[in-house]
Amino acid sequence: AAKQAGGARLARFDETLRAEQSERARIAAGLRQALLDDSLFMHYQPVVDTATGRIQGMEALMRWRRGDEIVPPGVFIPVAEQTGLIGALGTRALRLACARAAGWYRVHGLYLTVNVSTHQLRDPGFADGVREILAETGLPPTALVLEITESVLVDAADTSVLATLRADGVRIAIDDFGTGYSSLAYLHTLPVDILKIDQSFIRRHQDPPNPQDVSLTRAILELARSRGLVAVAEGVETQVQADLLRQLRCPLVQGYHFGRPCAAEAIDALLEQAARIPAV
Ligand code: C2E
Ligand code: MG
Ligand code: MG
Ligand code: MG
């Protein structure tokens, strides 16, 4: 009986694996098609200065419309990475975002921050591709930040690509800081400017904040400061969290409390409105 049950479990496992493979294949085919039409687009989330309450930058987040649904990047980015489509997707994302952000930079002085997969860095043409898009869209390199997720291993070649762009004035951010295996080691090996504290650290802060969680966040902020890095707290959802981060002098914040990611048109409206309201 035990053997039979094991067999059944194995069959089910097989089935799950097959279902996952075919879902992956379906997503990959959909992404190939999406590169030919306009179903890939960007949402933007404000990055806010805690001292002034002003918007300083925008993070571009990729979206994919498949029929009536919007597929989240957490689903399609990994498939794009596995199938080699990430290069084309990343280029599309960067071009769309830079084109939009050039206007936001000109009028409001905002910077743009774009997520980059380490797979993209392995493309020998990556740095030139970024330069080309900047020249094409008119966004100055100093107004661009590239976010590298910290959990992924970054090797010497990746580091030299980042250093090349950094010499142009592009800034580099470590995304999801604190979730990877070698957070601290990365601060030494990567040429970075910005440290984005992962949402999991921010989410811990309830009302009232627990002293242990507060000291953890404070330690990360001190680490950033001591290395000359600008810290950004991600996933700020409540007033308590916002107040705490301001008290701890975390320079920049992002999260639903300040604004959900939304379409470029909604950002235009938001910026117009913000320009009319004096900063707090
Ligand atoms: P990320 O770069 O860490 O982006 C932050 C994620 O948290 C976004 O999810 C954003 O919508 C979400 N978020 C923002 N504020 C809050 C909040 O207050 N509460 C909560 N619960 N969530 C919040 P999203 O858009 O689903 O993106 C997920 C991940 O997909 C990103 O994480 C990034 O790593 C990746 N990604 C998104 N766009 C791109 C892209 O163009 N290229 C690449 N390579 N990766 C991308
Ligand atoms: Mg990011
Ligand atoms: Mg990321
Ligand atoms: Mg993040």
Image: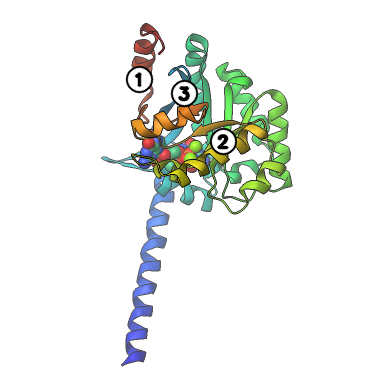
> Which residue bears the numbered disc 2?
221
Helix, strand, or loop for circle 2?
helix
Left or right, 229 with reference to 57: right
Q: Earlier in the sequence, mark 1 or mark 3?
A: 3
Task: Tell me which residue sits at (48%, 9%) in the image.
Answer: 107
Badge nearest the viewer, 2 or 1? 2
Q: Look at label 1 and name its amino acid.
A: Glu
The front one of 121 and 231 is 231
User: Which mark, by number, is residue 220?
Assistant: none
Residue 265: which disc?
Answer: 1
Residue 59 in view (yes/no): no
Where 228 sits versus 200, above or below?
Answer: above
Q: How far apart are marks 2 and 3 (CA)?
A: 14 Å
Q: Pick the residue in front: 129 or 58.
A: 58
Q: Position of residue 202 (x, y in %)?
A: 43, 40
Residue at 52 percent across and 32 percent down: it is 232
Q: Mark 3 points at which residue?
A: 50
177 relative to 17 in the view: left or right: right
Kindly give the residue lying farthest to the left in the view shown.
68
Q: What kind of element bears circle 1?
A: helix
Binning the other alpha carbons within 10 Å of mark 1 as few (below 14), some (14 to 19) or many (20 upward) gives few
Mark 2 touches mark 3? (CB < 8 Å): no
Task: Please tell me how crowded label 2 is: few (under 14), some (14-19), or many (20+) other residues with Cα within 10 Å.
Answer: many
| Residue at (43% x, 32% y) in the render | 244
Q: Nearer the viewer, residue 61 or 34?
A: 61
